[in-house]
Image: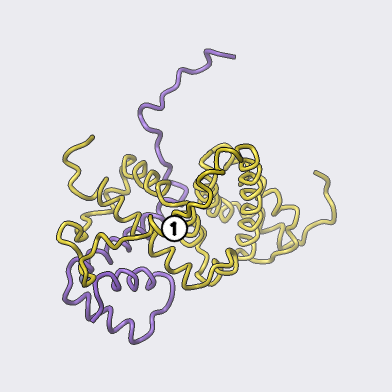
Chain colours: A purple, B yellow
Amino acid sequence: MLSCKETTKLVSENLDRDLSLRERIALKMHLSICSACRNLKQQMNVLRQATSFYTQEDVDTPKPPLDKKPDSESD
Amino acid sequence: MTETSPPSAKGQALLHDNDYLNEIRPAMLKFATLQLSDPHQAEDAVQEAFIGALKNADSFDNRAALKTWVFAILKYKIADILRFRQKQDQHLIASDHDNDSDNEEGNFDHLFDQRGHWQEQSRPSKWGNPESSFQQGQFWLIFDACLNHLPEKQSRIFAMREFIGLSGEEICKETELSTTNVNVILHRARMGLRQCLENNWFGKAETPC
Ligand SMILES: [Zn+2]
């Protein structure tokens, strides 16, 4: 049986490579009984969604409100 | 810049495929900004990378090749800028140079008990309605901060994988790390990011300060 710690590793690697059959089965078994790791898996999927959003044209990180600068006083 | 031999028609066409250039530009820019922590320098580096690609337009004949090519130039520019900076503040970095943060910062043992199960207080929660978070500017500020908070190597490899979309294998070639190493670094990066977002956004952010 996988530990949660090992599970986090497989959940991550599942995003980067094809897991072996044995790994997939072990992962599935663990996830079926562990809600914390199911949440972790969801979180890692959200991370991927977020990064793909982040690198699209329409998402531009807004300036923090404090960033207001007095314009053109010098020079 | 002087025009040398005319680029191939196909390459030229690709460079005038504005949709595609606009599509890959933000990712390149985000990558450069993350590496350089300077939006203006990042902007310049990306600009130069596109210009560099234009000069060699006959070296690629499809979109994937163009992207790889732009990215290759961009990385070179970034490395150049960083090397220059490093020279400038050699004395500043001398002291913590050999302190490879990889071991310490990538260690998530404290989240687990001896048998490798989540500690009660570190069990991941369910992140409700991420799509609505994506619509909020504040979320992206925190996301940005969390990315920048990762150890340098982790954010770099993570960005190669998730911003540029390189495969594990391609990252291996780029960085001369082993596949196992790349996997470990990506795992750590994701663990660090999720923890940071959990603490600062999705979790119960009841008490600021
Ligand atoms: Zn678990």
Question: x and y percent of residue B206 in the render?
Answer: 16, 41
Q: Ligand 1: which quarter?
A: bottom left
From the viewer's perspective, is residue B90 above or below residue B73?
A: above
Quick one: B134 or A4, which is closer to the camera? Answer: A4
Q: Is residue B179 left or right of residue A1?
A: right
> The N terminus of chain B lies in which quarter of the figure?
top right
Give whichever of B191, B27 is nearer the camera. Answer: B191
Image quadrant in which you'd find residue B47? top right
For label 1, the crowd category at 10 Å Cα-Cα, with few meaning under 14, some 14 to 19 and many 20 or more, is some
Q: Position of residue A24 (x, y in %)?
A: 32, 82
Give the vertical position of A14 relative to B201 (above or below).
below
In screen coordinates, is A21 left or right of A70? Answer: left
> Residue placed at 61% from the left, 62% from the top?
B68
The residue positioned 63% from the left and 50% from the top of the image is B79
Whether residue B169 sits left or right of residue A42 in the image: it is right
Residue B12 percent coordinates (x, y): 72, 57
Quarter-of-image position of residue A44: bottom left
- For disc 1, the chain is B
Residue type at mark 1 is Asp
Q: Tell me the residue that label 1 is attached to.
A: B102
Question: x, y (%) of residue B115?
Answer: 21, 72
